[in-house]
Amino acid sequence: METGDRAEAEEEPAQKSKFGGEDRREEAQRWERRTQEDDRRRRRREDSEPRLFIACDDNQDPLESADKSDKGQASLNLGMDLNLDWMTLEDFQKHLNGEDEILSAPPLSPSKCELRDAVKSGDYMSVKLALNSKEDYNLDQEDSSGMSLSMLAAAGGQDDILRLLIKGVKVNGRQKNGTTALMHAAEKNFLTTVAILLEAGSYVNAPTLGGETALMKACKRGNADVVRLLLEYGADCNILSKHKNTAMYFAKVSNNLLVCDLIKDHINMLSSVAEDTIRAFFETRLALLEPVFPLACHRLCEGPDFSLEFGYKQSPHTPGEGSGILLFIFHANFLSEITARLCGPCSVHAVVLNDKFQLPIFLDSHFIYSFSPVPGINKLFIRLAESPTAKVHIYIHTYIHTYTHTHTQQSNSWPW
């Protein structure tokens, strides 16, 4: 019995030793698997961040480093050989402006339809490669409705593509219904696109065949920021559409109170500036009774000709001695505020009302004219100086006026 007990006692530690060895082997296997997993993760990290790994790991093999460096360069090219290691700030700015020639991709010469599709889909790189190629593209190409490439870019808010195209296109081209690129951007509420087009010389007051302007389209959609920008660039609030509606009508249609307030405040501000300028010029000797037609705005850079049709109904008030109607042509600028003047350099060459020349009241100044409208519809035409780059806004306003009694005798000597 004692012998049996002793054998069992010897057998027990042997089994424990056996099981302990198995546990250690399993633990070693788990550690090996964990190490292999870590190695795989480390290799993936090295592949995705080659340059960072090369900079941080000082103990790696030089050949391996060179190999990984080549892989990193390939991953950073992204299809373009920008050569950022040696590129100067000036070269990088040229790249941003689309003026560089360092694209290493093979020359691309898409067809006219393919270029249009690239613009429409917003494929900036395809458009840029195409324009950098030797192919001669007609950038003013139109589809059956008259939609040009710049209109497609503006309608899609593709500002980067528009900047590429705008150097070689007519920004004031129109579709068959009279729609412009600016109208597309204003209606879609693309504020940056509107700003790009305005800076490039887009006509802010150009109408469609239905008489709608970019301002009307922005008001109709309730695009307050676009409306504010268009007003700063001289958009005319009082232009009438084909159905005799103004921008305020479309603002009310959108049911946007902010847009309505912007239009109303702008009209009130312009009227106030005009009246203050007149009073300052005449030193309060002129009393303004009522306007003949709403104040009109014309940007000098949009052309030398201004025309307007307006209805006139004779005032029931009997004009007294020294009373009449004057046409005022203000030269104004938008800086921190609107400033207007009735003296200094003048861009007005002639004023014609119903095919009759109107005379300036001062021989050496063409800002103020005698004005003789007839009851009914009148046609006004003003010929201005040509100045495509001018920032001056021309405001046209007419008032029935009379002179104060204290200056009646002095007014009799004036030419009107």
Image: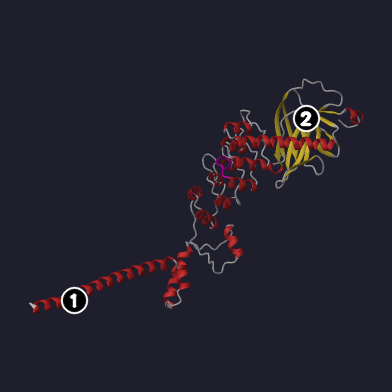
The C terminus: image quadrant: top right
Mark 1 vs mark 2: give the one in front: 1
At mark 1, the secondary structure is helix
Badge 1 amino acid: Pro
Please give the label number shown on residue 280: none
Badge 2 amino acid: Tyr
The answer to which of 43 and 320 lies nearer the viewer is 43
Residue beneath the point at 59% across and 66% down: 88
Magenta-span inclusion, residue 138? no
How many labels sit on residues? 2
Q: Which residue is mark 1?
A: 13
Residue 233 place in picture, x, y as percent:
67, 43
Q: Which residue is mark 2?
A: 399
Residue 59 place in picture, x, y as percent:
43, 77
Magenta-span inclusion, residue 186? yes
Residue beneath the point at 82% across and 27% down: 324
Q: Earlier in the sequence, mark 1 or mark 2?
A: 1
Q: Which residues are magenta?
A: 185-190
| Left or right: where 50 falls relative to 236 | left
The answer to which of 298 and 115 lies nearer the viewer is 298
Q: Please tell me in which quadrant of the rendered image residue 97 appears.
A: bottom right
The answer to which of 260 and 160 lies nearer the viewer is 260
Residue beneath the point at 9% across and 77% down: 4
Question: What separation in Å lies between label 1 and label 2 (alpha carbons)?
Answer: 119 Å
